[in-house]
Amino acid sequence: MLLEGHLVESGEPARLVIAGSTVQQVEQVENGPDVWIAPGLIDIQVNGYGGHDVNVEGVTPADIIELTHALWRKGVTAFCPTIITQSEAYIGHCLRTIVAARDSDPLIAHAIPAIHVEGPYISAEDGPRGAHLLEHIRPPSIAEYQRWQAVAGGRVGIITLAPEHAGSNEYIRTVAADGILVSIGHTAATGEQIRTAVEAGARLSTHLGNGAHARIARHPNYIWDQLAEDRLSASFICDGHHLPPSVMKTMLRAKGCERSVLISDSVAIAGLAAGIYETPVGGKVELLPNGRLNLYGTPYLAGSSSSLPECIAQVVRHTDATLAQAVMMASTQPAKLLGLERGTTQKGASADLTLFTYDETTGSIVIQATVVRGEMVYQRPS
């Protein structure tokens, strides 16, 4: 396979020679087509998209496969299906379903390198708890984690928790020793609790700035403490709704591109037409024409309805980040956090690539093609 365009990483026109599952050669050309070639986008927090829900009761392997295909059409070459707070039996069913989907097809397995369990070890307080069900919030349990991994074949790769729970530091040390990416999120922790969690092995903040009280102390508070902690990377929902542009700009400046990860945190309604929907988490919600998803009849967010390319476009539009830096935060940085040999277009790299056009006037990104492990899984109709 030959791909021509401009490399996002350098801006140079190039021809990529793909053989098997890797980039065999990167050749310089004088002129390339008006398309960007980027490392494949990686979304480490996806609850659903295009009507497909990771957390719906009775979710099937076919649902996960269809979700994967829907994300390929948005340029996402890999993602972490995200299971939220529920009973252990419910979480176990979701884990088994995702594993069955992976086992059905090597390309699906490649596209789902890890599973993200967001909760149930989060804050029970209104605000930090978000839309997670209060009845299922509980303290961290190493025994439960081991049961998760038993049914998931060891594929749980990210766990989001609130470190203020008793026993959190022992839990973090144990799962981090297994190679799990421990992330602080949906928390009302003190600065000391955040510091000791980091020392125990936490390496990420989940959607920093969200999953928080509507009103907090000016300072200190758990947002400042995580933002200032250089040992923590942070994921951000840069959809234009979860973080106002000024907050988005400031947080990215503080963390720096090298410690920032863009996520969609999309729910099943993402990618659907504006309207009113019933959801298993949150009940009745309204998707507005501007893309904001609210709990019906309220101004409160009910999740993200944006795709990862839309978040990249928002970052370029509203912050200091260049297009190359925004793409890096949605490809190279998540690959590093997950320990994947991906996130680059260099010779010898895994051929996971996203091709897109970018309109500087409108600030919009249009996916032209998606390549997963050397196979063209999506190509925009001409």
Image (cartoon, rainbow, N blue to C red):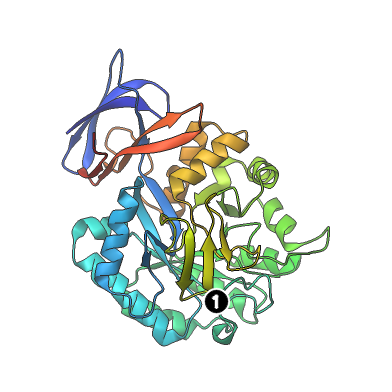
Residue bearing the label numbered 1: 171
* Element type at mark 1: helix
Q: Report the number of discs.
A: 1
List x then y, in percent, for residue 78: 35, 53
Residue pictured at 21% horizontal, 43% vertical? 376
List x then y, in percent, for residue 40: 35, 43
Quarter of the figure that contains the C terminus: top left
- Report whether 376 appears left or right of 64: left
- Report whether 307 appears left or right of 227: left
Looking at the image, residue 307 lies above or below residue 198? above
List x then y, in percent, for residue 281: 50, 74
Q: Nearer the viewer, residue 98 or 256?
A: 98
Looking at the image, residue 160 lies above or below residue 244? below
Q: Nearer the viewer, residue 284 or 39?
A: 284
Q: Residue furthest right?
A: 218
Quarter of the figure that contains the N terminus: top left
Residue pictured at 62% horizontal, 57% vertical? 208
Residue pictured at 28% horizontal, 74% vertical? 60
| Kind of residue at disc 1 | Tyr
Q: Residue furthest top?
A: 30
Visible residue check, residue 302:
yes
List x then y, in percent, for residue 354: 33, 39
Q: Tag 1: Cα neighbours inside 10 Å, few (<14), some, or many (≥20)?
A: many
Q: Quadrant of residue 147?
A: bottom left
Visible residue check, residue 330:
no
Looking at the image, residue 81 lies above or below residue 37? below
